[in-house]
Amino acid sequence: MIDYNLLRALEAVVSNRGFERAAQKLFITQSAVSRRIRQLEEYIGEPVIVRTQPPVATSAGQRLLTHLQQVLQLEAALGVASDPLTTSDRILSVRMAINADSLATWLPRALALPDYHFSFDFLVEDQSVSLKRMKQGEVMVCICSSAEAVNGGKVTYLGALRYRAVASPEFIEQYNINQVGDLRYAPCLVFDHNDRTQHDFLLQHAKFDPEYIHWCPSSEGFNQAMLAGLGYGMLPELQIADSIDSGKLVDLFPGEYMDIPLFWHYWQTESPYLKALRIHAVETAQKFLV
């Protein structure tokens, strides 16, 4: 059985960005913190911290931190906190794997839960691949497009984020876009190498893949690049409704769209706090998602 004093040392080093500050938080010496980290690594048989400046958790270390946060939340809910760091008014840490477009649109409202104090650590990845973080035990919650629950986990459907293919009037004029085929060699904006949204939509409606691509791994940067005429691509309706109404962006395929389903993945050992957060997120999603 893992000594939770060792896990608290790991959490203190990572959250306080160093061994010296961790020692101050735990009211022990720096050498004692180092000794606890070594004991933890000897126990699990691999490193838990990359000793950079600041130190960061390894994949194994992150799994241990996720486990610790689950235990702390359950202790707080039961009122059996085992030390001063786990009192009922503790700010509860939640590491989440999420997609950038949710973070840029509906998700902040979903996470603003009255009377609860969470410290969110967002791991932003495309919705098609973020579930791997859940499978590896690195996060407590994952929002992605997969409906299949991981081992030891559960899943709740949130709704679908609707996307439209758009470009600025200046872009359309510059590249002389008069028909669908003209888009083939015009610059297309793509979030990252995991993002197939533009490719799938074009294959369905235009029967070709984009040939000329700008990689733009930022949801707001994607929107600004679109408005500036750097390229065309797919953006959520929630993000571009005002720009379309004002004429700053033009719908390239009127009446056509792509709905990407989103699911909330969580562990079966969900604490009451995370359950309240999930319920609030589902209620909020129903107001904004399709």
Image: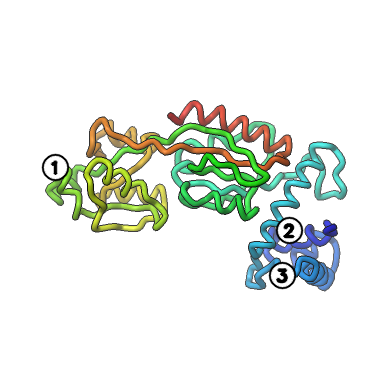
State the CA–CA distance, disc 3 to disc 1: 57 Å
Q: Is residue 98 left or right of residue 166?
A: right
**Residue 160 picture location, percent across and down:** 44, 34
Q: Secondary structure at mark 2?
A: helix
The residue labelled by disc 1 is 179
Quick one: 18 or 75, which is closer to the camera? 75
Q: Are marks 2 and 3 in contact (CB under 8 Å)?
A: no
Query: What label sits on residue 11 in the rendered view?
Result: 2
Q: Are marks 3 and 1 in contact (CB under 8 Å)?
A: no
Residue 11 figure quarter: bottom right
Q: Residue at x 72, y 44 (%)?
A: 91
Report, in whole angstroms, how far the alpha carbon at label 1 lies from the one at label 2.
Answer: 56 Å
Relative image position of residue 73 (x, y in whole percent)? 76, 43
The answer to whether residue 86 shows anywhere in this view is yes
**Image-based side of 96 in relation to 180, left or right:** right
Badge 1 density bin: few <14, some 14–19, many ≥20, Cα 10 Å: few
Name the residue carrying label 3.
Answer: 46
Number of the front mark, 2 or 3 = 3
- The answer to whether 155 is drawn above or below residue 85 in the figure is above
**Residue flagged by tag 2: what amino acid is it?**
Glu
First along the sequence among labels 1 and 2 = 2
Tell which tag, 1 or 2, sits nearer the viewer: 1
The span from disc 2 to disc 3 (Cα, nearest Å) is: 17 Å
Kind of residue at disc 3: Glu
Of the numbered discs 3 and 1, the one sitting upstream in the chain is: 3
Callout 1 secondary element: loop
Q: Residues within 10 Å of mark 2 (few under 14, many from 20)?
A: many
Q: Quadrant of the C terminus?
A: top left
Q: Looking at the image, is mark 2 or mark 3 earlier in the sequence?
A: 2
